[in-house]
Amino acid sequence: MPMSYYDLFIGGKMSVARITTLNFKSKEGADQVEETYKNSAPTEFAEAEQLLEVRVDDTTLMFVSLYADNDAMERASAARSKRMDINKDIIESMDGKTGNVILNHNN
């Protein structure tokens, strides 16, 4: 079987991403979570290689977390569940996806 790009150049290791989009019941709810995530996430998700928080509009936030592997991402699940539970009354809807990171370019 031919070697893949990842096997050849990265030794078969690639990061995994968790992308979560939250729609809030109000702008104030989104504002609240924006601030608490910005201040607490680096500590709560210490194994994350990278954390992004994106304000999509007044009531929508998108979060992207990169982890070294699925095990690291799963270890962060308890903190994620706790955060989601704390904010459940102000969240209108949630969409979550996970996948392998194909490109992570930084200048």
Image (cartoon, grey):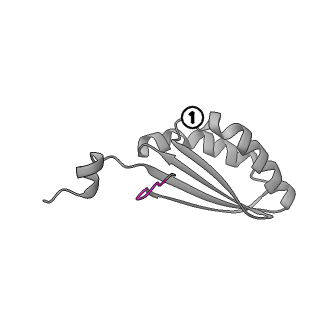
Q: Position of residue 26 (x, y in %)?
A: 84, 62
Q: Residues within 10 Å of mark 1 (few under 14, many from 20)?
A: few
Q: Residue furthest bottom?
A: 57
Is residue 20 or residue 7 the one in the foreground? 7
**Residue with the mark numbered 1:** 46
Judge whether 40 appears above or below 88 on screen. Answer: above
Is residue 79 or residue 1 the one in the foreground? 1
Reply yes or no: does residue 18 show up in magenta. no
* Residue shown at 48% from the left, 43% from the top: 74
Helix, strand or loop under label 1:
loop
Image quarter (top left, top right, bottom left or bottom right) of the N terminus: bottom left
Judge whether 85 appears above or below 93 on screen. Answer: above
Q: Position of residue 50 (x, y in %)?
A: 55, 45
Reply yes or no: does residue 102 show up in magenta. yes
Is residue 93 or residue 57 the one in the foreground? 57
Q: Residue furthest left?
A: 1
| Residue stretch rendered in magenta on the structure | 101-105
